[in-house]
Image: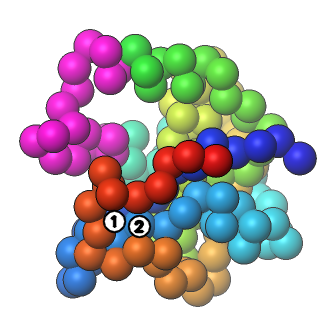
């Protein structure tokens, strides 16, 4: 199995900023049925997905970091969608698929969203070491 770098899916909720550990999402979704989806139909392609605070601005360096992650990602791994079809993991793969004109990619979708790992958290306070 490929080792996944520590990373989080963040979402604003009524509690504040909640976070899901992507490594746990991968484990929890590993037995979900895989479906093929059209990456061009993903709503988050048209939203501010990565740069969601004044501390996290889309500087050229930050964009370069995301471009490197897009280039390095593997389209064979399913993206993870929440129960409403929103991306919980896989935006770099979605971007790569769109750039490469790939019309379908594998995805899994939770029937019921897992609880967050961190509630009302600060991204800089989360563990990012393996």
The answer to whether 54 appears left or right of 6 in the picture is: left
Where is 25 relative to 15, above or below?
above
Secondary structure of the residue carrying tag 2 is: strand
Q: Main secondary structure of the magenta part?
A: loop
Residue furthest to the left in view is: 54
Magenta stretch, residue numbers: 46-63
Q: In the rendering, which numbered label is found on residue 129?
A: none
Secondary structure of the residue carrying tag 1 is: strand
Q: Nearer the viewer, residue 74 or 106?
A: 74
The answer to whether 55 appears left or right of 80 in the picture is: left
The residue that disc 1 covers is 11
User: What whole-number distance in Å separates the C-alpha atoms at marks 2 and 1?
Assistant: 7 Å
Q: Residue 41's x, y, as percent?
A: 49, 46
Which tag is nearer the camera, tag 2 or tag 1?
2
Q: Residue 64's x, y, as percent?
A: 40, 15
Where is 16 relative to 126, above or below?
below
The residue that disc 2 covers is 19
Between discs 2 and 1, the one toward the N terminus: 1
Residue furthest to the right in view is: 1
User: Can you tell which quarter of the image residue 25 is in?
Assistant: bottom right
Please name the residue shown 32% across and 23% down the image.
62
User: Can you tell which quarter of the image residue 69 is in?
Assistant: top right
Please name the residue shown 29% across and 69% down the image.
121
Answer whether residue 118 is magenta in the image: no
Q: Are marks 2 and 1 in contact (CB under 8 Å)?
A: yes
Q: Residue 46's x, y, as percent?
A: 31, 41
Answer whether residue 54 is magenta in the image: yes
Where is 66 relative to 130, above or below?
above
What sort of colour scheme is used for the picture?
rainbow
Please name the residue shown 69% across and 45% down the image.
4
On the question of residue 58 being in view, the answer is yes
């Amino acid at each position: 199995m490929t080792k996944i770098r520590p990373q989080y899916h963040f979402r604003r909720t009524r509690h504040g900023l909640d976070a899901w550990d992507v490594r746990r999402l991968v484990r929890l979704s590993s037995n979900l049925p895989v479906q093929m989806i059209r990456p061009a139909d993903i709503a988050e392609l048209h939203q501010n997905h990565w740069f969601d605070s004044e501390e996290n601005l889309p500087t050229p360096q930050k964009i370069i970091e995301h471009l490197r992650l897009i280039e390095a990602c593997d389209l064979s791994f399913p993206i993870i969608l929440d129960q409403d079809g929103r991306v919980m993991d896989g935006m770099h793969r979605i971007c790569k698929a769109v750039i490469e004109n790939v019309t379908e990619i594998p995805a899994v979708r939770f029937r019921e969203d897992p609880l967050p790992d961190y509630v009302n958290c600060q991204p800089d306070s989360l563990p990012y070491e393996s």
